[in-house]
């Protein structure tokens, strides 16, 4: 499920994919495209947990996923191939209780690196 959503986000050249937590309904998975949030899916609690677990498992050096724990990870294709044209995705798993549960910053071939991520 996560890899399909990531591929869909890449197809519209999104800069980020975000999982936004909502108290009044299902969580929203959005792709950030030129500053606009494009809704990709509405997810119930079980779907949200599956998506987070799959996203974590695709990250380099992933160990045991702990729901609600904050982690910074990197996805370079070490565990699962990246969509064509993507060099890496910087994954930020947020602590429970915030407005976002996941932010994945997508880096494309030909992007200029600012060096802050160590990439």
Image (spheres, helix red, strand yellow):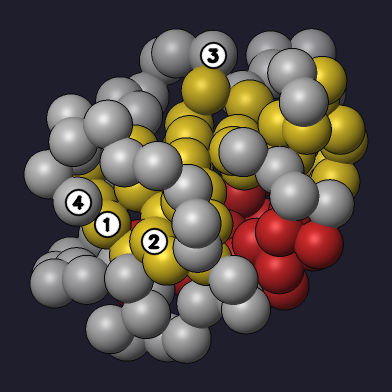
Dot 1: few (<14), some (14–19), or many (≥20) neighbours within 10 Å?
Answer: many
Q: Nearer the viewer, mark 3 or mark 1?
A: 1
User: Is 118 above or below relative to 82?
Assistant: above
Q: Quadrant of residue 9?
A: bottom right
User: Is 36 above or below relative to 17?
Assistant: above
109 relative to 34 in the view: left or right: left
Dot 3: few (<14), some (14–19), or many (≥20) neighbours within 10 Å?
Answer: some
Q: Are marks 4 and 2 in contact (CB under 8 Å)?
A: yes
Q: Is residue 55 visible?
A: no
Q: Nearer the viewer, mark 2 or mark 3?
A: 2
Q: Residue at x 12, y 44 (%)?
A: 118
User: Is 8 above or below relative to 85?
Assistant: above
- Upstream in sequence: badge 4 or badge 3: 3
Q: Is residue 117 visible?
A: yes
Residue 15 or 104: which is nearer the viewer?
15
- Return the residue at label 1: 74
- Upstream in sequence: badge 4 or badge 2: 2
What label sits on residue 119 in the rendered view?
Answer: 4
99 relative to 40 in the view: left or right: left
41 relative to 15 in the view: left or right: right
Q: Residue at x 52, y 23 (%)?
A: 100
The CA distance from mark 4 to mark 1 is 10 Å
Q: Are marks 4 and 3 in contact (CB under 8 Å)?
A: no
Dot 2: few (<14), some (14–19), or many (≥20) neighbours within 10 Å?
Answer: many
- Return the residue at label 2: 88
- Upstream in sequence: badge 3 or badge 1: 1
- Return the residue at label 3: 99
Dot 4: few (<14), some (14–19), or many (≥20) neighbours within 10 Å?
Answer: few
> Residue 8, how many percent across, how many down?
79, 62
Residue 49 or 70: which is nearer the viewer?
70
> Residue 68, how many percent across, how many down?
32, 35
């Amino acid at each position: 499920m996560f890899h399909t959503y990531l591929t869909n986000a890449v197809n519209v050249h999104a800069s980020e994919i975000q999982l936004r937590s909502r108290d009044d309904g299902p969580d929203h998975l959005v792709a950030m495209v030129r500053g606009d949030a494009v809704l990709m899916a509405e997810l119930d609690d079980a779907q949200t947990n599956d998506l987070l677990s799959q996203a974590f498992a695709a990250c380099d050096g992933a160990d045991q996923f702990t729901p609600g724990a904050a982690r910074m990870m990197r996805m370079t294709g070490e565990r699962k191939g990246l969509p064509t044209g993507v060099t890496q995705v910087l994954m930020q798993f947020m602590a429970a209780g915030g407005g976002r549960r996941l932010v994945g910053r997508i880096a494309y071939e030909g992007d200029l690196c600012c060096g802050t991520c160590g990439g």
